[in-house]
Image (cartoon, rainbow, N blue to C red):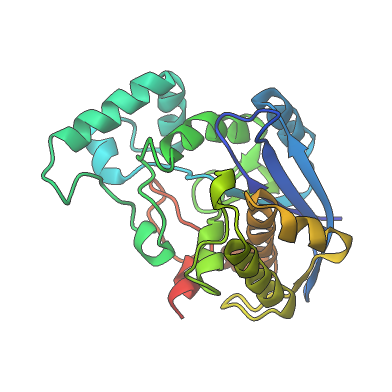
Amino acid sequence: MTLLHGIDFTSAPSRRKGITIATALAQDGGLTLSGLTTLHSLTEFSAWLQQQEDCVAAFDLPFSLPRELIGQQGWPQHWPALIAELSTLSRAGLREVCKAFCDARPVGNKFAHRATDLPAGSSPSMKWVNPPVAYMLHAGMQLILQAGFSVPGMHLAQPRKIALEAYPGMVARSVTRLSYKSDDKAKQDASRTEQRGRIIAAIEAGATPWQTPLQLGPWRDAILADSSADLLDAVLCLLLAGWAWQRREQQFGLPAFDALEGWIVACELASR
């Protein structure tokens, strides 16, 4: 029995804002949400990763950095070795490296980008603020590898534990370009609730470019009411995990890509 997971990750989980996991049983047709879990520390997250045995998990965190930054720093050109190198840095040390790189570049071209960022519409993975995705890579990726996950096209470990990079904002923007979430209570208004409702209706109907219906069952109201949209973002990652699992015999739907930089699953469909 293969389980599918969508993980909305934070690099600093707490009781206020945790790591959210949406789960479903793998199916070749539509999916049905079977559970939501929130973890409140990286220790809990590491234990959860270790417990997984037969799964495809789509994580909302970047799996690597831009090749341009990696080359400038003289870091390893083999991805698992790169992750090991990054784990020797403190969070502050990684920030210093990324900031120095940006400071030396002209206005309008501060950040380097991975090839996957443009089709997905994602932030540069070296960004340390708004959103701090570099910290998410730093905190999460080494734990995923330590738990024995294989990353298609990048790293072979336990063949029945599959990790994929996902980006829930990509799915949400295929439905609406208006904001659907905020951690700021002052901005948690009816308009954002309406947009979450639009996204939920689209994913339940399979009316996204990924055409994978996902039924939310008894969790639908809670997902709609969650103004931070942590629950919805986990569900959007789950949808991508399901799409990829249905293409498991075709490298989980992944194209040929740079194995050092990584690839956001199914991002080629975002512009269709």
Residue placed farthest to the front in the image?
186
Above or below: residue 166 compared with residue 200: above
At a point 71% along the width and 35% down the height, the residue shown is 49
At a point 80% along the width and 49% down the height, the residue shown is 36
Residue 185 found in image quarter: top right
At a point 73% along the width and 27% down the height, the residue shown is 44
Relative depth, front residue between 127 and 251 = 127
In the image, taking residue 204 as reference, residue 106 lies left or right, namely left
Relative depth, front residue between 237 and 187 = 187
At a point 74% along the width and 32% down the height, the residue shown is 50
Q: Is residue 74 visible in the rendered structure shown here?
A: no
In the image, taking residue 135 as reference, residue 113 lies left or right, namely left
Percent coordinates x, y for residue 122 in the rendering: 41, 56
Relative depth, front residue between 36 and 117 = 36
In the image, taking residue 3 as reference, residue 235 lies left or right, namely left
Q: Is residue 193 visible in the rendered structure shown here?
A: yes
Percent coordinates x, y for residue 272 in the rendering: 46, 81
Percent coordinates x, y for residue 128 in the rendering: 38, 35
In the image, taking residue 227 as reference, residue 85 lies left or right, namely left
Above or below: residue 69 compared with residue 180: above
